Image (cartoon, rainbow, N blue to C red):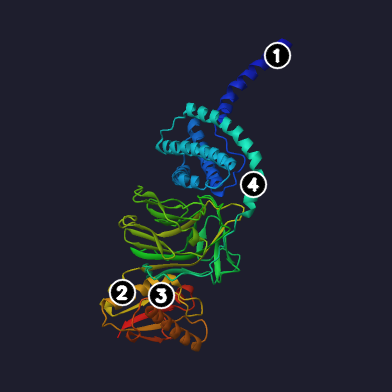
Amino acid sequence: MKKSSYLKRIIISFCLICLIIPNLQAQTKKLKRPKSRVGISSVDNFVRESFDLYDKVYRYDGYAEAGTPLEDEDIDVLEDALEDISGLTDSAPDILDDLDGAGMLKQGKATLQINRAKKALKYSLKTAKELLLGERERDTKDDNEDNTSHKDDTNEESDASNNSKTTNESNDSSEEEVSNVSDGLEVYSKYDFVPGDKLIFFDDFATDFIGDFPSKWNTNGSGEVVTLNKVPGRWFEFKQGYNTYFIPNLPRELPENYTIEFDLVALGVDGKTSSAAHLEVKLEDNNQFRTGKDFAKVEIPFVQYIVSNFRVRNRINNENTITNNVKADIRKAVLNKPHISIAVNKERFRVWVNEKKCIDIPKMVGINSPLKAIKFHITGFKEEGKERLFMSNLKVAEGGEDLRRKLMREGKISTNGILFDSGSANIQPQSLGIVRQISQVLMQDESIRLNIIGHTDSDGTDATNLQLSKSRAAAVKEVLITIYKISADRLSTDGKGETQPIGDNKTTDGKAQNRRVEFVKI
């Protein structure tokens, strides 16, 4: 009986070994993430993010090995990972430049970790492409070779790590924190963005209670209206979540020509911020929390340790025609309350960050594409709340046409695209795209003279608003004279205060319409 029981245990043990050992072997093939840091910020971030992406792709590779089909959400994650992998791979030569001046020991350790990260990226790039194409077959030979080489790397790295631990700690503590709040904005004398002149949607969250989710928005996640101690107004804080979208409740479909503008404040963004930290702005054919058949989207990067990419991607009639990464250095801009401007003119899609045009794609939006919604989504920000993103002053307006031709054709234009600081005549610099176009009309035809007329909403007293409207008209005149060198005798000014409203002063949208400037040929 005992012999039979003993034999039974042996058979069970053998079966368990047959089942478990293949899985254990599959796990040992995985590349090992370095356990210690080098102490060079760009290297440490490069290695960490390379292995974050590697872990993500490796997990999906396991799905393929087990025969588990990928869901739509898995495909989206892999496509985004593929873009991140390409961006990190491109940044590797720049990372190597950061080793100059470092000690020999630290250079050696950094080189080992960079090489390991590059192997992880090479695997991730190849595997992600094969998974997306449905052609993935696990290459165990490469895995075993990588695993063997990393045993040697780990031993060498361990020795280097012990000798450089103190240096790493001192480097970490001495990293300089960068301010995240604007302390002044430049004058955008060559800025060519022209906002739409027929307001569709506006929200500065002025009517929302602090701590509440904004009343004119929808989400499948969470967010709240807050105030910030160094910037005025109310701000909507996005809360990060997988596939979480924030959708303003637009009153109608998006037209052929329209513009989108908003301000951002990013807190906690520094040299350790992930290259995957993006704000996605997505124009889509539905206002639900699912991907539609038609969309156009851009992802604005917040990474600081490398020059990153804007990701642009579209879908027209359920077919992706554009998937690309566009490099632009906006690292300083995103730390200083950036103003984002987007213009859609039929198929053309353009994006500015402050005065810098970063994206200009002529065939991004499908002809007659039924786009209905604007969706915001954030990803890659640290989950523990160190990195936070806020938005305010979202404005969506129809138009964005060439005001020069309209002024020449009709002899007058009215625009609410020239923005001023609240209660003052200080022109916000992102408004200069309009003023620049007015100057070009005056330069082209020196016989033209203009009357500039300011209008306000009904907040405040009649007398205060009348004076404010006159001061704002005078401020526009001053910009035309000082920046664009227009002769003062060709310009006159007036102000009407709140006496000629074109919108309902009881609503946020109506007030935004009433705050406007007119240019009339004399």
At 54% across and 30% down in the image, what residue appears?
Answer: 149
Q: Which of marks 3 and 2 is nearer the N terminus?
A: 3
Secondary structure found at label 1: helix
Q: Tags 3 and 2 in contact by the CB under 8 Å rule?
A: no
Secondary structure found at label 2: helix
Q: In which quadrant is the C terminus drawn?
A: bottom left
Q: How far apart are marks 1 and 4 (CA)?
A: 58 Å
Foreground: disc 2 or disc 4: 4
Q: Earlier in the sequence, mark 1 or mark 3?
A: 1
Q: Distance between the residues labelled 1 and 2?
A: 96 Å
Secondary structure found at label 4: helix
Residue that numbered label 4 is attached to: 167
Residue that numbered label 2 is attached to: 440
Residue 191 screen position, x and y as percent: 38, 68
Front-lying residue, 103 or 420:
103
Visible residue check, residue 13: yes
At 70% across and 14% down in the image, what residue appears?
Answer: 6
Give the number of the disc on residue 6: 1
Q: Which of marks 1 and 2 is nearer the N terminus?
A: 1
Secondary structure found at label 3: loop
Q: What residue type is labelled 2?
A: Gln
**On the picture, is 4 further left or further right than 192?**
right
Q: Which of marks 1 and 4 is nearer the N terminus?
A: 1
Q: In this view, does 171 lie above or below 181?
A: above
Q: Distance between the residues labelled 3 and 2?
A: 19 Å
Front-lying residue, 332 or 125:
332
What is the crowding at mark 4: few (fewer than 14 residues within 10 Å), some, or many (at least 20)? some
Q: Earlier in the sequence, mark 2 or mark 4?
A: 4
Q: Which amino acid does label 3 sit on?
A: Asn
